[in-house]
Each structure stands twice: as C-alpha cells, then as structure tokens.
Amino acid sequence: METGTARAPPPFWAGGPAPGQTYIPGWPGPAPAATVLPFTRTLSPMVTGTSVLGVKFDGGAIVAADMMGSYGSLARFRGISRLLKVNDTTMLGASGDYADFQYLSQVIDQMVIDEELLGDGHSYSPKAIHSWLTRVMYNRRSKINPLWNTVVIGGFYNGESFLGYVDMLGVAYEAPTLATGYGAYLAQPLMREVLEKKGSLTQEEARDLIERCMRILYYRDSRSFNRYEVAIATEKGVEVEGPLTLEANWDIAHLVSGFE
Amino acid sequence: MAAVSVLQAPSGGFSFDNCARNSLLEAELGGKGQRLPAARKTGTTIAGVVFKDGVVLGADTRATEGMIVADKNCSKIHFISPNIYCCGAGTAADTDMTTQLISSNLELHSLSTGRLPRVATANRMLKQMLFRYQGYIGAALVLGGVDITGPHLYSIHPHGSTDKLPYVTMGSGSLAAMAVFEDKYKQDMEEAPEEMSVSGGVCVCLSAPTIWFSCVLTLLQEEEAKQLVRDAIAAGIYNDLGSGSNIDICVISKNKLDFLRPYDVANRKGNRYGRYKCEKGTTAVLTENVALLEIEVLDETVQTMDTS
C-alpha cells in the first residue's frame, strides 16, 4: 500500500451540500427549461372501453356497457365498471380512455357530495349533467388536452326520460337511441329500426333490445366482452344491474369449413 | 381428360407498367393544377344468404363519386353465369370489369368442360386475379350460386382472400347489414315456414321442438331469406351514407332464377306540390322589337344518328 500520495476520498454524496460550504438549495440550478418536462397532453388512450349503448323507454332510460378494459388488443381488465350512478335520477356510461373516466367519476362524485352538503333539496338533473359535461369536454378539447371519452348520459327526471351523448370533441346531442364506438355501426341500425316500428318501448322491450345488441357487439366487435352491466333509470331511481353474461350461439359453425 | 385451356395463362407476378404511367399522368396534371378524376366508388351495402334450396343475393343501388351520388339506380348484382351471380362493392369500374372478365372466361371454361360452371371455379378465378394485382383492383365481391354440388356463397376481398360462409356482407354498409344477419339468421332457422302455419297452429308448435332436437338443420325458407336480405340491405341504406336508393334482390336456386330489380323501392323521390312555372304575362312587356336575321343558306345535309 502506497503511503506517498494521499488521494481525496470519494465524495459521500453528489449534488448536495458540501461540508463547511454555505448551502443554498437549488441555486443557481440548471436553466429551468432543461429540468421542467414539457407540458404533455393526452396523445392517445391507453386502457380503453368499447361501445356504450343507450335506449329511452316509456318511463325511463337504459344505459349499458360491457365490463372490459382493453390495453390495445390485450383484454387486460375484464371486470371493470364503465357505468357511473350519479344520483337517483342520472347515470352515465363512458367509452374511451378508462383513466379519464375514473378522473371524471371522481370529479362528478365530489360535485354530488358538495351538492348534498348544501342541503337545499335540489339534485343534479340528467340535462344539467349533460350540459355541464358538454362544456367541460369542449373546453378541454379547445386547450388541445381532451378527456378521451365518449359519454352517454341517461336518466329520468320530472316524469321525462333523458338520453344524451357527449364526446371528446364536445359534440353533444340527444336522441332516443345512442351508441358509441362500434355500437354506432352495429347496434344503432337495429335500435333505430325497432324504435321506428314502435314509437315507444316498454322497459322489458328496451331491455331485450339492449341484450340483442350487446350480443351482436360481442360477435362482431373484437374489443368487446360477453360480460356487461346495465343501468336503468326509472321514477324509482337508478339501478345498476350486473355483471350479466351473454350466451353466444355457434350453431352455424357446423356450416363453415375451409375458405373456398 | 386434359382440357386444353382456351384462356391465356397470365404471366406470373404483378405488372407495374400502369404504375409508371399513372405517376407520370399525375405529375403532368398536378403541375397544371388539375386533379385526376376520382374513382367512382360504389360505397355500398351488399349481402348474401344461403337458404334451403339456394342463395339470395341483395344489393343497394347507389353509386357515389366522393360526396356526390353519381348514379341513383345502378345495378350491383352482376351476371357471371346463368347459375352464378356476383354482387360488387368498391371501385365501380373494377367490379364491373372483373366480373365481366371472369364471366367470359367461365363461359369458355364451361364450353370446354361441357358442364355447368361451379361457384368454386368462379371463386378461384376471381381470387387468383385479385391476388395477382395485390389489392390495386378495388373489388370486394359477394359471389353466390347453385351448381351440381349445391348452393354456395363466398365473400372475396380486394387482396384476394375468400371466405365461404352461410351469410356474408360487404361494402361500407356491411356492419349494419351484418348486425341484421347476426340478429335474425339463426332465429329464422327454427321457425316453421309460413305455408305450414296456416294448416295447423298446434302442429307447428309440436313440430318445432322435434325439428330442434333432430340434428337436421332446417334452413331458411325462400321467403324468409328474401325478407332477411331485404332487411339487411335496408339497414345499410338507412344507416350508411354511402348506400341508398333501392334494394335489388337475386334469388338463385336449382330450378329457377329470380332477378328482382328493384325488389323494394325504399326511397321514392318526392312529388312537387306546386307549379313553379310563371305564366306568360307575369312580367309586363313594355316594348317589343323584332329584328330579322339575314342568313344565306349555303348547304343542307342530313346526318343520321346511330341509335343501334
């Protein structure tokens, strides 16, 4: 072991105060532009939910969504709820980014609590929630930082059923039948046909229609799942039923063999 | 039995000749500010279903050129052979020319073999040609027909893949039509046909479970199949902007062929309620000045039009 040259010991720590020196944390610091990460915005959804269906019937409305959160093409979460019961008159279902839906749920739940604390006897109506959400979504998109969701709001308030749609661009409208995502292509034609033949549906008919449409979505949408939830709003309140399972019919499999 | 093919066997691979010509044309016209004419797409709903004795093919009748309806009543169900018809979606020129070519080749082939052509043969010819062109021929087809082996239905995609299925849909309205099929196709298989239900309601109820439990698949009856295809095309017409106008149906079975065009006029043009013509005298005439034009007739010829 050499005793000649004494080497300075390795520093105990880096980037911190030196013994005996005046320490001013963060001074002078590197230029702010280098450390602060650029403000990033939602570029693409991560965990997503597929279609949400909504149907108005005589005396209320139904909103249905399957219980799957897809991570791209991976069926990652197969038991998540994409429906939210806002209060006894309103419910909503969201497709698109699940994280944004969870944030939205948090905000809405807090709003409902704050309102209950007011104790003035008023509660949010479905139209009010729809209107509020439209403004929120539109303003977020105007800042190029959208909540990547398409939301279906359903409810029954003051004797009238309500069904509204808001998407991540702030596009909002009301209709007797609604569907987001692939539902718009697969389920909407069926729902519209039934509603056009019969001007209004009973609760059982609407429920039956929703089940038929969910089954077709399970057959033909590759990001769907056969377990789903249904939220029904009537004068009695909002009831979320689920998880319900769909049975698929594979009888035609016997007719298919090869591709030519 | 070596059948000498009277067809010209095409040289292998993809011919890139027209690609060079197209890029030259594009550059030439683009420089002058003109755009190449847009391909006329059919933007369609076409569908087919296999029923007990044959197949039913259906199509809408709208042809679009971008956002404009180019043809309100075009025929999308093309003749391949007397027992085989083909619906076409995608680029209109591609579907027309492809089906005509295969129809012609199939006729020659049929004369050569001395047999009624088979649907599988038409399928092979179509897919081999489309694959050769690597998807550049934008023809998505629903091919159906009845031959000696029975009724067959195929869907053929522009890149050359084929599927042999009991029910198929293609085109921009295919999802709407497929939703109708998925909802109602199996359901109809269990229903007793309308003719039987008239004779005895009780009989129908009792026979239904036996049909179900016996493993014979009771296929769609013809009227149900026609109604199902009509409903599927209607779903496409009313819910897809690329499809519209009327519904054409073609029923092919062993003994007959029904080419029903139109089967259902789903969209009728509205009638004008008022007369918009202004009668003479609506605008007051203040002065009238007639000036004769002096013309010297030099030569008079008659050219007949070729109205053949």
Image (cartoon, rainbow, N blue to C red):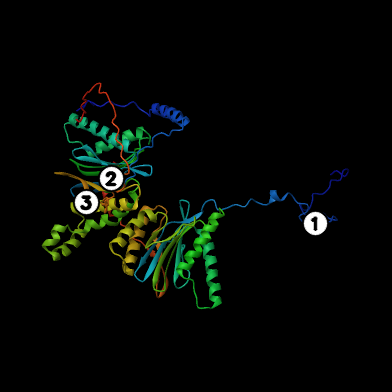
Q: Residues within 10 Å of mark 2 (few under 14, many from 20)?
A: many
**Residue at coordinates 36% horizontally, 57% vertically from top-left?**
A188
* Tag count: 3
Residue ID for mark 1: A24
A75 vs B10, nearest the viewer: B10
Q: Amino acid at mark 2?
A: Thr
**Residue at coordinates 21% horizontally, 55% vertically from top-left?**
B215
Q: CA distance from mark 3 to mark 2?
A: 17 Å
Residue occupying the far top of the picture: B298
Disc 3 or 2, which lies upstream in sequence? Answer: 2
- Residue A68 placed where, x, y %? 44, 59
- Determine the chain carrying the residue at label 3: B
A157 vs B112, nearest the viewer: A157
- Residue A70 placed where, x, y %? 46, 55
Residue ID for mark 3: B226
Is residue B246 something that shows in the picture? yes
Q: CA distance from mark 3 to mark 1?
A: 85 Å
Cβ atoms under marks 2 and 1 closer than 8 Å: no
Q: Amino acid at mark 3?
A: Lys
Instruction: Name the side, left or right, on which A46 lies relative to B96.
Output: right
Task: Please tell me whether mark 1 sits on a helix, a strand or a loop.
Answer: loop
Instruction: Name the side, left or right, on which A70 lies relative to B2.
Output: right
Q: Amino acid at mark 1?
A: Ile
Residue ID for mark 2: B61
**Residue at coordinates 76% horizontally, 55% vertically from top-left?**
A26
